[in-house]
Image (spheres, rainbow, N blue to C red):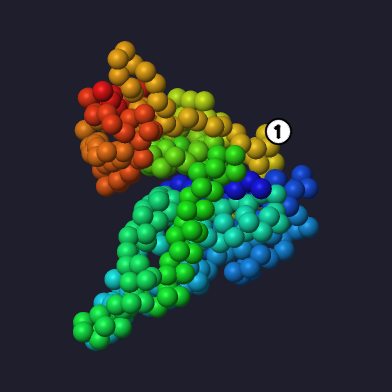
Amino acid sequence: MRIILYTGKGGVGKTSVAAATACKIASTGKKVLVMSTDQAHSLGDSLDKKLGYEPTRITDHLDAMEINAIEECERAWGNLKDYIKKLLTSRSSDSIEVEELLVFPGFEELTSLFKIKEIYEQNQYDVVIVDCAPTGETLSLLKYPEMFGEWIDKLLPIKRKAIKVAGPTVEKITKIPMPKDSLFDEVETLSDNLRKLKELMNNKEVVSIRIVTTPEKIVIKEAKRNFSFLHLYDYNVDAIIVNKVYPMESLSGYFQKWIKNQAEALTDIKESFAGIPVFQLELLKQELRTLERLQAVGAALYNSSSPEDILFKDTIFTLRKEEDFDCFSIHLPFFEIKDMDLLHSGDELTLIIKNERRKFTLPKKLWNKEVKNASYKDGKLNILFE
């Protein structure tokens, strides 16, 4: 099975492009599911079909669904959340503020990925197309398998045996509820799901991410940031889709100045994402909705290309010898060295870029070495160890 995620700034047309891609692939006879993780669902509007939380048949080879993130969230960690709630309210009254504390930014979106993992394991489709939420939510969604996995492993460090032996006494003295044995099973299940989800999302033979943008400077800048942060978390971006390109015959009179602006924007995209396939879709005369229009646009967008293929694969991390030093290199284009900070401790390297933080477990070869210096050149952060 192939899984292809479409992301980008709000309003660039991710949903329409995802739906058109699904139609294009389904027309070749492959069995396709297109699904939305955006809580403000518009996939059903694009397909002109009412969708639910289970796959709905669109054509013989195409199904579609809109994920209920709240329901998936409750399935993933409802009982664990209830226990944390008891801890927080054990010496105070229950209140709405406690419920708000237990809503982690991006966690509902993360549980949408559990649904993708579940569908992948069922193996009933050839291709799954995912219409993701706008960039910010998508980045939260994609970084959570690693972050939340570490957090959940440290949340309940008390061992089962200790709870069984000392739990009742501790609970009686402190009035703090002890976790039931079944809760440990649920924590282990959640932790295991997070680990498997991270392995799936980082499997470049299965998962690709495609960034949808428009030929406007502010949108292109966000696409570049999006690309860099996806690289930071080792996800494979295999195509850029440029939507809403003005046809040349429409750029006259009032829109004359757009000729130069659009040409510069398209050149910037091609140069910035050199090597990665770039597909263009012209601004249409009507809304991109209904199955017939989506099928026509999908065929025009990809032409003779097969969108279910892995269109590009990049090596994000490399380890090489540089003179007498080991150089750990990370491909992170579109940043500046002043945006970055490094922390090194034992076998871990923490990279902080603006408000994002990523921990790397270093190759064993570097575990007993110290960072000599770091430099940023040609879109790569090069860290020398001695």
Q: Is residue 221 shown to the viewer in this render?
A: no
Number of marks in the image?
A: 1
The amino acid pointed to by label 1 is Ser
Left or right, residue 250 beside residue 11: right
The x, y position of residue 78, in whole percent, is 44, 74
> Is 213 placed above or below 276 here?
below
Left or right, residue 80 beside residue 129: left
Left or right, residue 43 beside residue 386: right
User: Is 204 in front, or is 191?
Assistant: 191
User: Is 167 in front, or is 373?
Assistant: 167
> Is 303 placed above or below 357 here?
above
The picture quadrant where one finds residue 178 is bottom left
**Residue that label 1 marks:** 304
Residue occupying image coordinates x 26% and y 83%: 169
Residue occupying image coordinates x 66% and y 48%: 1
Residue occupying image coordinates x 62% and y 55%: 120
Mark 1 burial class by Cα count in 10 Å: few <14, some 14-19, many 20+: few
The picture quadrant where one finds residue 164 is bottom left
The x, y position of residue 83, in whole percent, is 36, 77
